[in-house]
Image (tube, rainbow, N blue to C red):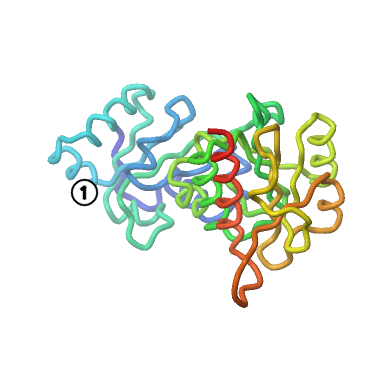
């Protein structure tokens, strides 16, 4: 196991950039996962390096519990030089968190094809320009729990492999296939051609969400937090769907809307 105690180390400086700049991550084809549980859940075949602080390693060793065993199992799948111990102040340099847990993994970028999100009886979430990383991460987490088969995203959505999205997904990002498209209206039209009914979630839609048949191949379209779905994307979908609301509330959070619609589909498919 390597040990690094200097923040001027080139590997440390490059890893710190991954936490700060999407351009650095894209250039090297990687993203980072930070936090003990998140790192341990990461796909071993994609992990390039794991950085662990001295205090984190000592704490894990002393506990000798399930996390320690899972950590050892993950490390045993990696090349010998892939585990790097660093001093606590060095870990703070590469961390994106105010209170670092002491473990961070550099992981190869995940890549999927459109076929990967259409498996079985497709239930696809389509996201247009969802810009809050917390919303995107929560949608991934909820999508996995509700049995969604994949996520189709516009380019203007928050980077799904940014540290904030990865963290808020609670590991779901490792298991939920996603595709980013340059032309969302065209991609929605392609789903319709493939026999997947696309439901545009809008307040002015004609059908209540629990009155639609979501047992067939379906895609649920969720729009930008402030503006909702664009007219172009709405027109590409064959159906509209809305969630009734009481009181004076004008709209729901994008992640909440995605959760309600996804779980309605899950209920119908049980």
- Give left or right: position of 129 versus 78: right
- Measured as percent of width and height from the top left, residue 266 is found at 55, 39
Q: Relative to residue 194, is residue 169 depicted above or below?
A: below
- Give left or right: position of 132 versus 38: right
Q: Relative to residue 92, is residue 150 depicted above or below?
A: above
**Relative depth, front residue between 78 and 74:** 74
- Measured as percent of width and height from the top left, residue 174 is found at 50, 36
Q: How many numbered dots are placed on residues in this image?
A: 1
- Measured as percent of width and height from the top left, residue 168 is found at 47, 52
Residue at the spot 41% in from the left edge and 40% down from the top edge: 105
Residue 217: image quadrant is top right
Residue at the spot 21% in from the left edge and 48% down from the top edge: 55
- Measured as percent of width and height from the top left, residue 231 is found at 85, 58
**Relative depth, front residue between 117 and 111:** 117
Quarter placement of the N terminus: top left
Residue at the spot 74% in from the left edge and 53% down from the top edge: 207
Q: Residue furthest bottom?
A: 248
- Give left or right: position of 264 versus 6: right
**Relative depth, front residue between 186 and 250:** 250
Q: Relative to residue 136, is residue 106 depicted above or below?
A: above
Residue picked out by circle 1? 55
At mark 1, the secondary structure is: helix
Residue at the spot 87% in from the left edge and 51% down from the top edge: 235
Q: Residue furthest left?
A: 62
Q: Residues within 10 Å of mark 1 (few under 14, many from 20)?
A: some
């Amino acid at each position: 196991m390597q040990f690094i105690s200097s923040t001027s180390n080139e590997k440390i400086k490059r890893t710190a950039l991954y936490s700060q700049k999407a351009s650095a991550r894209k250039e090297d084809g990687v993203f980072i996962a930070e936090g003990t549980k998140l790192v341990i859940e990461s796909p071993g075949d994609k992990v390039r390096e794991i950085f662990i602080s001295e205090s984190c390693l000592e704490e894990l060793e002393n506990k000798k519990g399930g996390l320690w065993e899972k950590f050892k199992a993950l490390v045993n799948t990696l090349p010998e030089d892939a585990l790097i111990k660093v001093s606590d102040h060095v870990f703070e340099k590469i961390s994106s968190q105010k209170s670092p847990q002491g473990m961070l993994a550099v992981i190869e970028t995940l890549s999927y094809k459109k076929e990967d999100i259409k498996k079985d009886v497709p239930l696809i979430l389509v996201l247009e320009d969802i810009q809050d990383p917390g919303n995107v991460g929560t949608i991934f987490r909820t999508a996995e729990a509700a049995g969604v088969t994949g996520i189709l995203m516009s380019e203007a959505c928050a980077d799904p492999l940014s540290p904030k999205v990865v963290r808020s997904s609670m590991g779901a990002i490792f298991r939920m296939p996603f595709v980013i498209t340059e032309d969302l209206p065209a991609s929605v039209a392609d789903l319709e051609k493939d026999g997947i009914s696309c439901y545009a979630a809008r307040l002015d839609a004609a059908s209540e969400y629990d009155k639609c048949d979501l047992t067939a191949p379906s895609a649920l379209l969720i729009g930008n937090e402030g503006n909702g779905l664009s007219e172009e994307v709405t027109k590409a979908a064959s159906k509209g769907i809305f969630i009734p609301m009481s009181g004076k509330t004008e709209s729901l959070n994008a992640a909440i809307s995605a959760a309600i619609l996804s779980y309605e589909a899950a209920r119908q498919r049980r």
